[in-house]
Structure formats: structure tokens, C-alpha cells
Image (cartoon, rainbow, N blue to C red):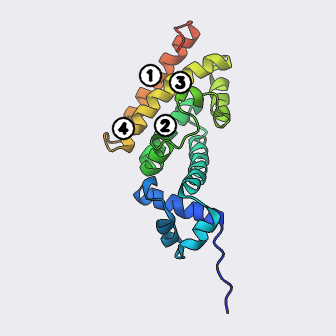
Amino acid sequence: MPPKTRITKDRIIQAAIEVAKQSGYESINARTVSAQLHCSTQPVMYHFSTIDAMKRAVYAKVDQLHSAYMMTIPPEQDPILGIGLNYIRFAVAEPQLFRFLFQSGYAEENSLLEMVDSEELIPVLAAMQEGTGLSMEKTKEIFLTVAMFAHGYASIIANNGLEYNEKTVAKHLERAWNGAVLAATQGGEQA
């Protein structure tokens, strides 16, 4: 007799990510995840006592995937432009996961101003600081400007309000970046 397949917490999280990709984070529940795993709901509920706990674990995993996606930049591309474009590309490639991350209310930070001080953002800010040679305070100002711009583009695209055109988006993102750097280096007003 073959051994029973063990349904692990990691497998449940992966299955829930697939459910979210296919039909949105709102569809994550014991029934949809167990159907994805071809098992009963019992293993799902064994590992997660509530659906909210499962969604929070899935959110954390998707956030890690998003961070890795953003930081995967071709060597020939400017790192700052690459991070911004990858943020938008993620919304193009995974609109349901983008909405889960940024439009579901599951983020620990309540605003962009809180996010700029989060631990998860340290690698992004460090890459930006290296690219500008400015202080971390100025780098955060630049990040906020560019992040608002990139997030606006990504949100509109993820919600089917705009067709993605890489060349146009890159040009606009570069202008936002250059303007933010110029304002930071010339002592522009604080955000």
C-alpha cells in the first residue's frame, strides 16, 4: 500500500496562491484550497484554524515572491528603473496577486509612509541609495515619489484600466525618477 501524501502547511500555502491567481484572494477558503490539493478540508483546517490565518500566511508568501520579483533586474538595466518596472510588471503578470498585496487590507503597513520604514524595503532602498549616492532620508523621499507613480500605474493596469506598454511606462517612470532626484538634490520641499 503506497504511503499517504502528506499535506503540509507549505503545500496548502502554494495551493492557496494558485486559487488566488485563478480567482482572487477572496476565493481562498478551505473548500477551494482542498479542491486544489485534491484532498478533504480536514488537512487545511488542521494547519490553519481560521481562513484569516491562512490568508495571512499566503499574503506573507506572496509578499516574499513579490520582493524577489522586484529585485530580479537584468545587469544591463539601471537598478532603480528596473525595480520600478518590475513592480509594474508584477501587476501585469499577476494582477490577482497584486490586488491581494496592495488592495486587500492584509498589509501590515497602513500606508506608503509606514511601508518606507519597513524591514522588507531595506534592500530596495539600499539599491536606490547606492545608485544616487544620497543620504537615506533623501533616498526615502525619492522612493516615495517613484513608488506612488509606479503604484498608480500598476494599480490601473492590474484593474484592467490600462494596457501595458513597456516603452511608454519606462519613459514615464524615468521622468518621475529624474524629477524626484532633482527635487531631492536641490532641496525641494519635503513630502
Crowding at mark 3 (Cα within 10 Å: few <14, some 14-19, many 20+): some
What's the distance in space between the residues labelled 1 and 3, CA to CA? 14 Å
Q: Which residue appears at 68% of the width and 29% of the height?
A: 126
Secondary structure state at the residue bearing disc 2? helix
Q: In the rendered structure, which disc, 2 or 3, sits on the residue that comes first in sequence?
A: 2
Q: Which residue is mark 2?
A: 85
Residue 35 higher or lower than 151, as above or below:
below
Q: In the rendered structure, which disc, 4 or 1, sits on the residue that comes first in sequence?
A: 4
- Which label is found at residue 144? 3
Q: Which residue appears at 52% of the width and 8% of the height?
A: 189
Question: Would residue 171 be found to the left or right of residue 127 on screen?
Answer: left
Crowding at mark 4 (Cα within 10 Å: few <14, some 14-19, many 20+): some
Q: Which residue is mark 4?
A: 156
Residue 177 higher or lower than 162, as above or below:
above
Location of the N terminus by quadrant is: bottom right
- x and y percent of residue 98 in the render? 47, 45
- x and y percent of residue 161 in the render? 31, 40
Q: Which residue appears at 37% of the width and 41% of the height?
A: 157
Q: Which residue is mark 1?
A: 175
Secondary structure state at the residue bearing disc 3? helix
Q: Nearer the viewer, residue 50 or 40?
A: 50
What's the distance in space between the residues labelled 2 and 1, CA to CA? 13 Å
Marks 4, 1: nearer the viewer: 4
What's the distance in space between the residues labelled 2 and 3, CA to CA? 15 Å
